[in-house]
Image (cartoon, rainbow, N blue to C red):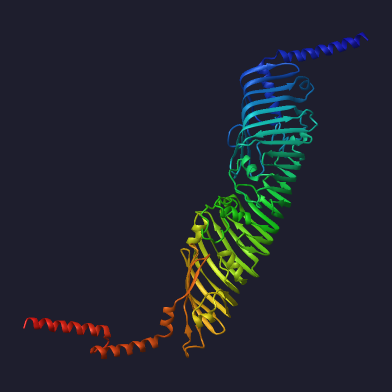
Amino acid sequence: MKWIFRAIGILLLILAVAVGSLFLLPADRIARIAADQLHNLTGREVTITGDVGLTFWPVLGVTAGGLEVGNADWAKDGAMLSAANAAIGVDAMALIRGEIKITNIEAQSPTIRLEQRRDGRASWQFSDGGGAASIETAPSAPARSPRPLTIQRLDITDATLIYDAEGADLVRFAGVDLSLDWPERAGDAVIKAALRPAADRVTIEATIDRFDQFLNGDIRPLRARVDTKGGGVTLAGRAGLSGAVAGDLWFKTSNTERFLAALGVGAVALPQGLGKTTNIKLDLTLTPDRRLALRDVVADLGGNALTGAADIALNGTPDVNAQFNVGTLDLTGFARSDASGSPAPASGTAAPAPASSSGWSTAPIDASALAGFNGEIALRADSIDLGTLSLGATRVLLRNDRSRLVAELREIRAYAGVISGEFVINNRNGLSVGGALNAQSIAMQPLLQQTAGLGRFHGTGDAEVSFLGSGASLNAIMRSLSGSGAVNVGRGHIDGIDLDALMGNFDVEGGTTVFDSLAATFDMDQGVLRNDDLLMQLPNFTATGTGQVGLGAQTLDYTVTPKALQVNGDRGLAIPVRIFGPWAAPQIKPDLQAALDMNFAKEKEKARQKLNEKLEEELGVSRQDGQSVEDALKQKVEDELRRGLFKLFD
């Protein structure tokens, strides 16, 4: 028994000497030990500088004027972490047992620089101090069992966080607070962060199961939440230090504009129905090379709902390949926001404002969102309400390449017909729009009523048009339009004018004109449409037309000339009708002087000849060849005056 007590005493003495020897170490020696522990953990050079203070039992550690943790050897800019007023604590008993148990790491106002490359390398992927990979696998390195590691508490305050992804814009946040709670080495870790990219505070909280395995490179279960005053994002899934993430994402906002502003996106105007509020659920997969796959997307955008999937490459400008299906797509909120004079949404160009006495909208169109992505988006809709246009079943492919968006209209059911073609929005060097459209079997009255406020014309027709316009507002674009087109309409009618009555008593007020066909071609220049070959076939008439339509000014100045075929002998009877004034309230008046000139030219000439002969007889004048009666009379008066003057000098 005595020897047992002696043995225990000797062991206690050895332990006391061992621990005491740690207490007797100078502060800079403890600093080197702490730095070595971090080096063993990360494989990076760790430097402690400035004044060094010593802490003792139960926490062995140092405070230092500066702490620097080196970056990966391929990183291009500075240390991964550099801080002033740093503190590192190491559990002395755990260290004696051969464990690395860092009780706390504190840093004030550090700069944290994280870098990532397209090949999947990331500066936060560490290897241990012996060169063996603890996170990133090095196939040639000998297998080693990592020393047990625990960081019970990490506190970073007022940090500057820099994220540099190769090919992407640099992300920089200041005033970041970060904490890690990991009390048990084989337990879960809770990570919290708070930052202010803009005015509102953004909080992030994540829980990672078996954080030790996560640090060793394993994919571990993850629960994360991002919150702002405008809304938040929740992720429940799995993640790894390599940048791989997969799981269910839920994005819900009560004010998306405020949510985006809190993340530093800036002022974004989102109309109702296009994301002003959101409730989006999807399955997300992100690979280490920053390829994002979105599946089973179900989104409520505050009135409009869509489903679909997307693949997005996040190296540089996002490259998108997506397919979305919507039921009834209501874009009236988009049109109203532009017509009211407020800035147009950043998600695209402004929708046409209704024709009115106030003209087209002069509100600036913000098409900067076209620079935010490249790629293709296929869209299917059962119907689309644009406010000024109503479309049926729609299939559209959007292709965007460096701020030039081409909308391939594969099929648009509209106004009882089908529209196809291309529509181009180009914002590479100022905003311009153009395209080539083809319409088949379109009901003209609802189309003209909704687009131009012209509701008198009824018929079903085909049309084709190519156009180009440019400008910073819808008004500027409409006033710059150039291009050409053609229209062919079958049997129809025109309200408000009765050609039969016109031919009988020159009354064009009220009534209806029925026609068998109508055809015309036109050209556009500087926002003015010009047509000179309108031909309308009617049961007892033909009608021609010529004039112009002010697309930018919303005005008309057009003359239609109907011709009765069964009157006035074989010559017929033509009555020009001028339509002029603003689109909203055009005037319609027959041109009677032109009608007389066109229909009774021979009769007028005979009457003129009889009148001249009568004047010659009554006035006693005779005309020379080609001389009018007026000229002959003037010549006679001059001759008489001349003879009278000569007599005065006889």
Residue at 74% across, 42% down: 235
Left or right: 83 with respect to 633? right
Figure disc tally? 0
Q: Please state the horizontal and vertical placement of residue 294, each as a whole percent of the image.
A: 71, 50
Residue at 52% across, 52% down: 364
Left or right: 633 with respect to 80? left
Q: Which quadrant is the N terminus positioned in?
A: top right
**Relative height, residue 559 to residue 123 (above, below):** below
Q: Residue 42, located in which quarter of the rendered image?
A: top right
Q: Is residue 341 visible?
A: yes
Left or right: 477 with respect to 276? left
Q: Please state the horizontal and vertical placement of residue 503, each as a whole percent of the image.
A: 50, 82
Seen from the viewer's position, the closer of residues 587 and 54 is 587
Seen from the viewer's position, the closer of residues 180 and 265 is 265
Q: Please state the horizontal and vertical placement of residue 482, each as a whole percent of the image.
A: 49, 65
Q: Can residue 531 be seen in this view?
A: no
Q: Residue 252, located in which quarter of the rendered image?
A: top right
**Relative height, residue 578 to residue 72 (above, below):** below
The residue furthest front is 618
Left or right: 292 with respect to 13? left
**Relative height, residue 521 to residue 365 (above, below):** below
